[in-house]
Amino acid sequence: MSIDHSTPDLRRRSPSSSPQNRGSPALPDEEVTARAKTSAKLYGVVTPDPAAVKAALSPKIHPYLTQPDLLVLDNLFYDVHDGNRGKPATIDSKLSPETIEARADDTNINTNHDATSISRLKALNNPNDAAFQPTVFVTWDAKDIPEPINHYIIRPYARLAMRIVRHPTDVVFLTHLLLYSTVNLGSAMYMMFYHFTYLHGVAHAVYTLWCAGSFTLMMHNHIHNNGVLKKEWRWLDATFPCSPPLIPKPSSGPDDLSTTIRYQRDDIFHFLHYIGRFLLLIWAELPLYFYRKGKPNLALRALVSELASYAFLYYMTALNPRAATFAFLIPLCRCASD
């Protein structure tokens, strides 16, 4: 398996080949003129230049969309540009969406481009395919990074990372583990034990809060899959703290400890009640939850982990209250609200 290769540009060019209009379908001139004249009659304005109207009505694709997004949009624009419109099937609530789609009258439409798009989408997520692209960052795709950096840094790192993570698609998890254990941890230790400034504290808190969403998703994956790294790296997986199942999920059942079914989402007091319960009572509720579910080992681990966390926060705050506020307390409240 190799990812060091050159893949074709999957984004179709519009007739203008403008980067801003990448993938945009061209409107027929007669349609542009008709729309311009209609606008002039309705609003009493001078008929604008059809070329200007054409440019304004052409959809724009954001250059930082992911490669799968570009593929899907490119496919849809192909249909619009070529006028591919099948007759919709009769909607029957007893039929599945797949059956309705199969019965739709699109037999006369050329769907070769659909098959091509689907095969490319599958290839991007298939580690055994030459076009496979592991996710390394959540902010940039390979197409957004200069090719020399991709060739000499990103791809070699991705090849190495795929030998460490449990699944080749999870390279981004290792990226975040490295960021958290270097940038976040290093910054917190510098503030706590060397020198604190409010500028550094605010910058640290903002960056940590920015990471909170990705961290929560990674921890969710870690909890449900009992780790994100291969067996040889189990010792690193085991260093993760025992995280409570209190990530709010709208579909949580009434017996789930993280359920939000009893809370009104637009009520500030309900929100504060939920967060307060997480911060102040999780040390007792989580072990009891595991005990009721017949998991005494997890109950003990949760109790020790939660009490150790409270002891750590108390000690750090007593040692350096200003640094601890920005390094630990503010991020803790943010993670509790996820």
Image: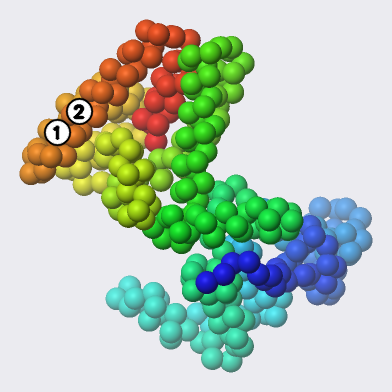
Is any part of residue 235 visible from this angle? yes
Q: Can you give x and y, in whole percent of width and height, for residue 64 in the image?
A: 67, 53
Q: Nearer the viewer, residue 288 or 311?
A: 311
Q: Residues within 10 Å of mark 1 (few under 14, many from 20)?
A: some
Is residue 262 placed above or below 9 in the rendered structure?
above
Query: Which residue is disc 1 drawn over?
Result: 300
Q: Amino acid at mark 2?
A: Val
Q: Can you give x and y, in whole percent of width and height, for residue 81 in the image?
A: 71, 75
Q: Amino acid at mark 1?
A: Leu
Disc 2, SS = helix
Query: Which residue is disc 2 drawn over?
Result: 304
* 98 relative to 64 in the view: left or right: left
Q: Can you give x and y, in whole percent of width and height, for residue 245 in the image?
A: 27, 40
Is residue 47 placed above or below 245 in the rendered structure?
below
For the residues bearing labels 2 and 1, Cβ distance under 8 angstroms: yes
Q: Residue at x 64, y 77 (%)?
A: 79
Disc 1, SS = helix
Is any part of residue 286 visible from this angle? no
Q: Quick one: which residue is furthest to the front in this view? A: 232
How many numbered marks have been drawn onto this rendered protein structure?
2
Q: Residue at x 41, y 45 (%)?
A: 217
Is residue 138 placed above or below 94 in the rendered structure?
above
Q: Residue at x 53, y 24 (%)?
A: 187
